[in-house]
Image (cartoon, rainbow, N blue to C red):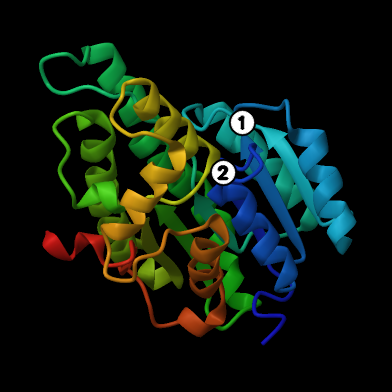
Amino acid sequence: MMGRVEGKVAIVTGAGREGNIGVAVCRALLREGAKAVIGTDMRADQAQAISDSVAADGHAGAFRLVQQDVTSEADWQRVIGDTVAQFGQLDVLVNNAGLSIHGGVLNTSLEDLRTVMAVNHDALFLGIKYATPHLASAVERFEGGGSIINNLSMASYMPNANNIGYHVSKSAGRMLTICAAQELGSKRIRVNSIHPGMTMTPILREGFEDYVRQGLWESTEAAEAALAAMGPLGISSQPEDTAHAFVYLASDESRFMTGASIYHDGAIGLRY
């Protein structure tokens, strides 16, 4: 089925690096008929290359990649204001940007913890807060109303003593999602979350390379094989796999879903 998000305008944060989930979500929304997709990211070094690639896929003019600090209220107001001014609407918000600083309670500084919380939790709050007045009008255009989708990772329900900031912030994002779903339902804005497992992104591959340097695995290929073996399917996830779930929640097919979690982790989380 094509055209599942026909005519919708979306903002997707954390879309500034080729091969990550954010870029895959942007491409998937455009393939399914989105009127416009605004990708945002702190980094701008790949902006032109990603824009050229998306244009080559036949979506020139429907995609922009802009710089944004998701922890900044002013940046949220600017990005949302510019989007609505240019395209006249906002129908979907994908809070995808994230940050991880490894460490446990004893070796994580308060500054690092607050930095991770700001990106992984506070930014969701700001995005929801400033997007809501515009998403509320989506019900006039689409049966499913407005849609907010938070990328919360399987870290939201799987403990990790060596990455406390990331896991705690993602868990807090789950409660924020549920509370916002309750509050915004009367405005016909749906708020849901997706919890990807370890997806083969550049950041994950860099993590594998670090583990190889530490002698924990012989090669990145061995690391990926070990990851795949953790789940019953025996395969690893690609960004494009996860993007399908975001399209579903952005589309009117999910008009009756709010406050829900999609565990896109290959059942690795079953042990929890």
At label 2, which amino acid type do we have? Thr
Q: Residues at badges 1 and 2 in contact (C-beta under 8 Å)? A: yes
> Which residue is at a point 64% across and 26% down the rendered structure image?
43
Pinpoint residue 19: horizontal percent, then vertical percent: 62, 46
The disc placed on residue 68 is 1
Residue with the most extreme front position: 218
Residue with the most extreme bottom position: 1
Categorize mark 1 by other alpha carbons within 10 Å: few (<14), some (14-19), many (20+): many
Pinpoint residue 134: horizontal percent, then vertical percent: 59, 57
Pinpoint residue 31: horizontal percent, then vertical percent: 73, 69
Q: Is residue 116 above or below residue 229?
A: above
At label 1, which amino acid type do we have? Gln
Say which of 1 and 226 sits in front. 226
> Which residue is at a point 69% across and 68% down the rendered structure image?
8
> What secondary structure is found at the residue carrying circle 2?
strand
- Residue labelled with disc 2: 13
